[in-house]
Image (cartoon, grey):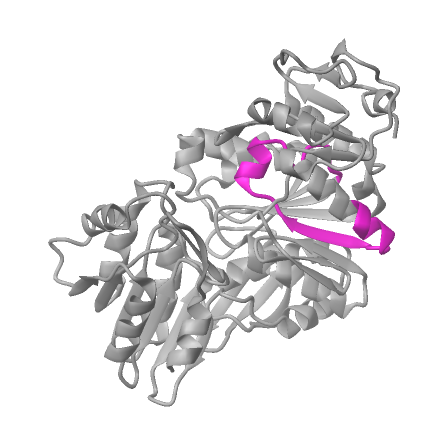
Amino acid sequence: MILKQLLEGVDYELVQGNININIKNIEFDSRMIKEDSIFTCMRRPDSDGHKYAQSAIESGTVALLVEDVIKNVPDNVTMIKVNNASVVTAYISNALYGWPSKSFKLIGVTGTNGKTTTTFLIESVLRNLDYTTGLIGTIETHIDDEIIPAKNTTPFAPELQKIFFNMKNKSVEYAVMEVSSHALELNRADFSDFDIGVFTNLTQDHMDFHITDENYKKAKLKLFKMCKHGIINVDDNAADYFIKNANCDIITYGIEKNADIMAKDIEISLSETSFTLIIEKNERKIKVKTPGKFSVYNALGAIAVCYKLGISIDKIAEGIEKADGVPGRFQTFVGKDGYATVVDYAHTPDGLLNVLKTIKEFAKSNVITVFGCGGERDRNKRPIMAKIASEYSTHCILTSDNPRSEDPEKILDDMEAGIKGTNIPYERIENRREAIGKALSLAKKGDVVLIAGKGHEDYQILNTGRIHFSDVEEVTRLI
């Protein structure tokens, strides 16, 4: 596409070069420059694309999108100056791929916890009705039957629009995606044509990025400024904020407070959760293959979406009940020794609390919890998570998660501050493999071991780089 056409509707300054050049690719990584690429110098909290402009030039970029003029750029490289490169990157990415999300119904799910499971449940209902679907999220991307491992919860704008373009080419009818607060704040999903937005909940996370709760809420709110219909968990403390400030019509769901879509008579076992669904005075029994009250909330969010899409309650129930559990989300193993092991992605205070509350409902004996906290992330949640673990466990093992460049022992120090002084026995075992092994060696018949924090992840990020590591693989090897 001709650069001049890409920029139609954009307020820009041509610093140098020719805008009548062909653009085939939009890149934000200078190492990925291909033929006829424009390199976008986006600013992010952890990097500034302007620093890599020279590398992009050396790699053959034909144009630069900048916020600040870069000196000594060759005459044959076009330079376009804009006020916000992230916003313009999203705009021209949409334009390059022909605004692909307009060709299907797009559903976005945002919230601290529950995004992945909610999207999988929605997809299950739609696929059960033989619709061609797409899914984008933390674990993987689906384009009809094609499965692609995920890099980010929500891809950067050029990647996202390319995925949408591929979905369009596969005749996708419905696409459902997780929309993270980072993605919303950094404009990755801007100009996407969201039909429905879902808010699951808002609890402490990403304070290293958003700094304040107000910033966190504002980032999430962006989805409800873009979508046509909003679906809100009315039981969450932030629900009123989203209902009052959204630019769309709202449907609510909940358990505790009055809502458009509700659940009652909740029953939880080790293998499933059942409840009575109430919609417009109609009642229907629903079963979900994941235990826990949080599973009811996830199911209600998915049900609300499908109901808004015009799907019958019976067909929704059928699709929900057929949905397999999500990898690393309350994934349960029962070994020959008679104890249960749960692997879960819980990496926030609220996420850990929900999982432990669920376990306490069916645990017959001890609850042994293994967990860590990520390096270079919100430090404030570390002692909070340790305190929660101590209140709902009979034994805790503090270990590493993804320490990144932080000293793992200092992360454990932060965590330990929340458990010191309690009566719960605990250990510090920095090596995650050893920590899991110790927990399983302590378990006896009737006990439940929770391994929290990494869930589906098959890697660990250390100061020396990324290594292969999977909690699920460790458990299956040891039990």
Q: Is residue 34 above or below residue 346?
A: above
Residue 223's x, y, as percent?
A: 63, 37
Q: Is residue 314 above or below residue 6?
A: below
Q: Is residue 309 above or below residue 54?
A: below
Residue 330 part of the magenta-drawn span: no
Question: 118 or 139: which is nearer to us?
Answer: 139
Residue drawn at x 62%, y 28% is 55
Res. 208 image quadrant: top left
Question: 251 or 295: which is nearer to us?
Answer: 295
Q: Is residue 254 left or right of residue 55?
A: left
Image quadrant where one finds the N terminus: top right
Residue 283's x, y, as percent?
A: 62, 67
The answer to whether residue 38 is visible is yes
What segment is highlighted magenta in the picture? 165-193
Residue drawn at x 23%, y 50% is 409
Residue 180's x, y, as percent?
A: 56, 43
Q: Is residue 464 above or below residue 478?
A: above
